[in-house]
Image (cartoon, rainbow, N blue to C red):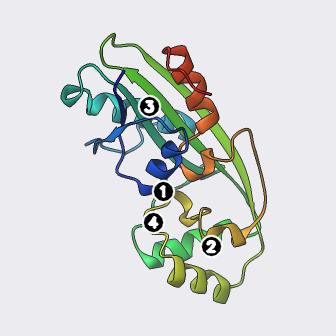
Amino acid sequence: MHLVLASTSPYRRMLLERLELPFDTAAPDVDESPLPGEHPAQTAERLSADKARAVAHHHPSALIIGSDQVAYMGATRFGKPGTVERAVDQLRRMQGRTVVFHTGLALFNARTGHTQIRGVPTQVRFRSLDDAEIERYVHREQPLDCAGSAKVEGLGITLLEALSGDDPTALIGLPLIALSDLLRAEGIALP
């Protein structure tokens, strides 16, 4: 069955390539705003399914993978900062604290209409950081498209004291352990 990654993220593409399955990518057009009263984990899971379904009209017989990540600490959400100033502000607020990065994953079978959804949380403890460290990191890494400004596949790993979760690839944006389970449930053979 044809496999499609509903994402233009180079990080998710690189992760999916590790499974050595042929796939295409497609850009989903989805409003990523949280719904009123929606918990951040619910937002990530809903958006992962929305992204997968959004590209189904172009791939009516494919298995479509959607993923989304929301970082939060208590009631505070940390989205993609978009600007250097917001990235610096996010990291200042997260330094020395634990933040949950909840990655939503969906596998949509466009042929049957069946959707499997998983949520994979990762607790991340940031080191105590001074302003100079934060500004150097943001200037060098430019993490403007990463939830919580923490590009852990690059220099962002140096900002962390510890992390805890079931799938290390979830923090980068595509939980491969969970995805492997979902693909097997759809009859895709993996090693």
Looking at this view, is 13 or 133 the one in front? 13
Give the number of the disc on residue 155.
2
Gap between marks 4 and 3, in whole Å?
21 Å
Can residue 136 be seen here? The reply is: yes
Q: For residue 81, which numbered disc appears in the image?
A: 4
First reached walking from the N terminus: tag 1 or tag 2:
1
Separation of residues labelled 2 and 4 (CA atoms): 17 Å
The label number, if any, that marks residue 79 in the structure image: 1
Marked residue nearer the N-terminal end (3 or 1): 3
Please tell me the numbered disc located at residue 46. 3
Q: Quadrant of the N terminus?
A: top left
> In the rendered structure, are the residues bearing label 4 and label 3 in contact, judged by CB atoms less than 8 Å apart?
no
**Label 4 Cα neighbours within 10 Å, binned few <14 / some 14-19 / many ≥20:** some
Residue type of the residue flagged with mark 1: Gly
Total marks shown come to 4
Left or right, 190 with reference to 158: left
Image mark for residue 114: none
Q: Quadrant of residue 170?
A: top right
